[in-house]
Image (cartoon, rainbow, N blue to C red):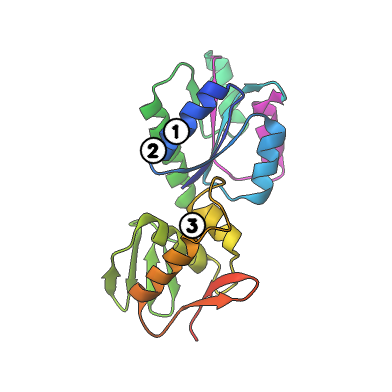
Amino acid sequence: MRVLVTEDDENLRVALEFALRGDGFAVDTAADLPGADEALMVNAYDCAVFDRMLPSGDALAYVRNRRGAGWPLPVLFLTARDSVADRIDGLRVGGGDYLVKPFAMPELIARVRSLCRRDMAGQAAVLRCADVELDTGRHQISRAGVLLTVTRKEYLVMERLMAATGRPVSRRELIRYAWDEMADPASNVLDVVIARLRRKLKDPPLIHTVRGSGYRMAPL
């Protein structure tokens, strides 16, 4: 699951990134709303965490405007404002949750995970390609009814390929989805994962290299 954290306090931003990464999330960060805008334009996220009061503006108004344009991403607001009216305002504009500072990091992680799962509930429970099934709820992959043993990165790469329903997915997109902004698109981490998946899936091959585009998953 991939999370965007927008927080202007550098120490807290780093702490949030460290804690979420340690719990298995892919994390991108921004220090202000223009930075969040840029990240949201190029990446797909399962949840966004916003400090409410930022030097570039009130994140509540930012989310309200995006919601008006049909933006569905689950949002958790962080704030020092703890009145009931403030919490109601946060929920009214489309915030999925509202956490008052100071907070316990395990509680934040639990709330982020809950928001991500809530968003995933609207997605297809099982993705299929030929005789391969990927269960998004159980995080399991099987071929011809046989359960495969896969790592987290292998699962994420397969999930993105299968969700594309036969369309090519670029190397950059796969790396951003399974790793995060810190991963180097020129490294061979993706090639290693693709090679392992091909061995585990066996024949007939389903993951195909699309020269100049990336990879796609489809029957021959």
Residue 62 horizontal/vertical position (percent): 69, 32
Q: Which mark is residue 123?
A: 3
Residue 169 horizontal/vertical position (percent): 58, 66
User: Relative to 195, does residue 25 appear above or below in the rendering?
Assistant: above
Q: Which mark is residue 22?
A: 2
Q: Residues within 10 Å of mark 3 (few under 14, many from 20)?
A: few
Residue 37 shows in this picture:
yes
Residue 122 shows in this picture:
no
Q: Nearer the viewer, residue 120 or 200?
A: 200
Q: Nearer the viewer, residue 175 or 4?
A: 175
Left or right: 181, with 38 as reference point: left
Q: Secondary structure at mark 3?
A: loop
Magenta range is 57-81
Q: What residue would you read off at disc 1? A: 18
The amino acid type of the residue labelled 1 equals Phe
Q: Residues within 10 Å of mark 2 (few under 14, many from 20)?
A: few
Q: Secondary structure at mark 2?
A: helix
The amino acid type of the residue labelled 2 equals Gly
Q: Earlier in the sequence, mark 1 or mark 3?
A: 1
Q: Identify the residue shown where x is 66% and y is 34%.
A: 63
Membership of 76 in magenta stretch: yes
Q: Nearer the viewer, residue 216 or 92?
A: 216
Q: CA distance from mark 3 to mark 2?
A: 26 Å
Q: Identify the residue shown where x is 47% and y is 59%.
A: 189
Q: Viewer-nearest of labels 3 and 2?
A: 2
Q: Earlier in the sequence, mark 3 or mark 2?
A: 2
Q: Which mark is residue 93?
A: none
Residue 119 horizontal/vertical position (percent): 49, 47
* Quadrant in the picture for residue 141: bottom left
